[in-house]
Amino acid sequence: AQRVTQPEKLLSVFKGAPVELKCNYSYSGSPELFWYVQYSRQRLQLLLRHISRESIKGFTADLNKGETSFHLKKPFAQEEDSAMYYCALSGQYNFNKFYFGSGTKLNVKP
Amino acid sequence: DTAVSQTPKYLVTQMGNDKSIKCEQNLGHDTMYWYKQDSKKFLKIMFSYNNKELIINETVPNRFSPKSPDKAHLNLHINSLELGDSAVYFCASSRGTNGIYEQYFGPGTRLTVT
């Protein structure tokens, strides 16, 4: 069955510290992975997708098919990174069907 | 210039009532969605329409009925509301179905059933 797991509900780090938000997935076919972010009082929006292989706001994520993971990383966290982060999965069986994880709240302390 | 809008933002109602949530997108997208976010923050897809045609219909009680009068609108009607329906409902849209496209989300509607 398709599933996205984000094991951490809350992650607190100090400004300037590295941050890694974990995401593991289960998908029988070829997956496409995304990270969505929701800043306070804003709507959910796309942060990055693995096929783009780009860095957005200093964040990167590498798809590791062997470990079925798509962890989100940033070497130096900023206070403005504080938000709710959702990992999401879609794939070849149904392009429109996204499976979301339960989200990780990132709190960057000054 | 709101891309995906939902009304109302908050909805408080009693068990047994019938209510509707409206969604509109001005992005010219062909596909629209309804998601439910429960108290544990899980975001789960409920329905999806492409050009007014239902393409995703997850295991959702029959009390939930989506309606798409045109491809810019997708409304959600809920009959005989139950306590367990309390959640945040998000509408979203994307370009189409011939590829995996970014989904654009509305601000959410917080439904509280008392």
Image (tube, coloured by chain):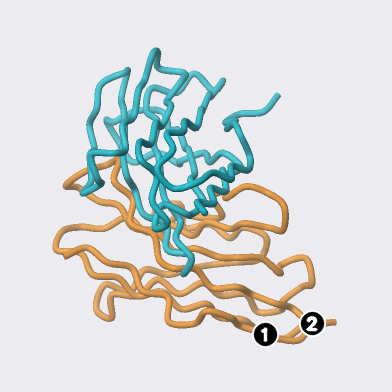
Chain colours: A orange, B cyan
Seen from the viewer's position, the closer of residues B15 and A73 is B15
Say which residue appears at 56% left-offset and 75% top-offset. A73
Q: Secondary structure at mark 1?
A: strand
Say which residue appears at 29% left-offset and 39% top-offset. B63
Q: Amino acid at mark 1?
A: Ser
Give the residue number, with chain letter if any, for mark 1. Answer: A12
**Residues under numbered marks 2 and 1 in contact, where contact means CB atoms less than 8 Å apart:** yes
Q: Amino acid at mark 2?
A: Lys
Subunit ID for the residue under disc 1: A
Residue A14 sits above or below residue A95 on the image: below
Left or right placement of residue A94 versus residue A19 in this view? left
Residue A106 sits above or below residue A44 on the image: below
Q: Earlier in the sequence, mark 2 or mark 1?
A: 1
**Residue B77 locus on image (x, y percent):** 39, 31
Disc 1 residue crowd, few under 14, some 14–19, many 20+, Cα 10 Å: few
Q: Secondary structure at mark 2?
A: strand
Q: Residue furthest right?
A: A110
**Residue A5 locus on image (x, y percent):** 36, 74
Give the residue number, with chain letter if any, for mark 2. Answer: A109
| Quadrant location, the N terminus of chain B | top right
Left or right placement of residue B23 versus residue A38 in this view? left
**Residue B22 locus on image (x, y percent):** 51, 27
**Residue B33 locus on image (x, y percent):** 39, 36
